[in-house]
Amino acid sequence: MEISSNMYSSLTAQNAAAEAMSSRAANSINKNYENATDEELMTACKQFESYFIEQVYKEMLETIPKEEYSSQATSTLVDYYKEQMVQEMAATTSEQSGMGIAQMLYEQMKRSGEGAVTAAQIEAADEGAGAVREAEAAAATAAAAIPAAAAEEEA
């Protein structure tokens, strides 16, 4: 299967975006919350909820048929600004109404050690983040294979 430069650029951009999000989540996860105030704990929980909502919005966007753009530069710009829009929408949703995930996570963290995050919780979160990265990679690979398979069918 031959990968076109267009598909390669798209995968590279998606990979860079996933790495940035993963890094942002890891920084939040790896922070020591043992001596955290209630406000810091709630902020971390809201960041997690925002990241979760962002992933949901991205998956929703994947269900919309993509338009063909006139050039690679236009396509790259559209993808970049779409990524920025999704991040901002997720942050706004989390701040304004949220889904209740932040509050539930906050309450659980308070119950399980009065603000202290255990090593097992951090390990579980790291495993979850790894699973998200693996799922994103599998989705990108599958998305790249669809146009190639369609082209092979036409030939």
Image (cartoon, rainbow, N blue to C red):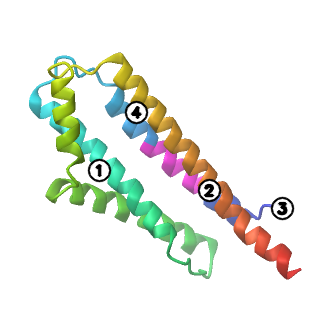
Secondary structure state at the residue bearing disc 3: loop
Q: Earlier in the sequence, mark 4 or mark 1?
A: 4
Residue range (magenta): 12-21
Q: Earlier in the sequence, mark 4 or mark 3?
A: 3
Q: Is residue 73 above or below residue 43?
A: below
Which mark is drawn over residue 26? Answer: 4
Type of amino acid under label 2:
Ala
Q: On the image, numbered disc 3 is attached to which residue? A: 2
Secondary structure state at the residue bearing disc 1: helix
Q: CA distance from mark 4 to mark 1?
A: 14 Å
Q: On the image, numbered disc 2 is attached to which residue? A: 140
Q: CA distance from mark 4 to mark 2?
A: 21 Å
Residue toward you, 95 or 97: 97
Frontmost of labels 1 and 3 is 1
Q: Is residue 76 above or below residue 71?
A: above
Frontmost of labels 2 and 3 is 2
The residue positioned 10% from the left and 34% from the top of the image is: 39
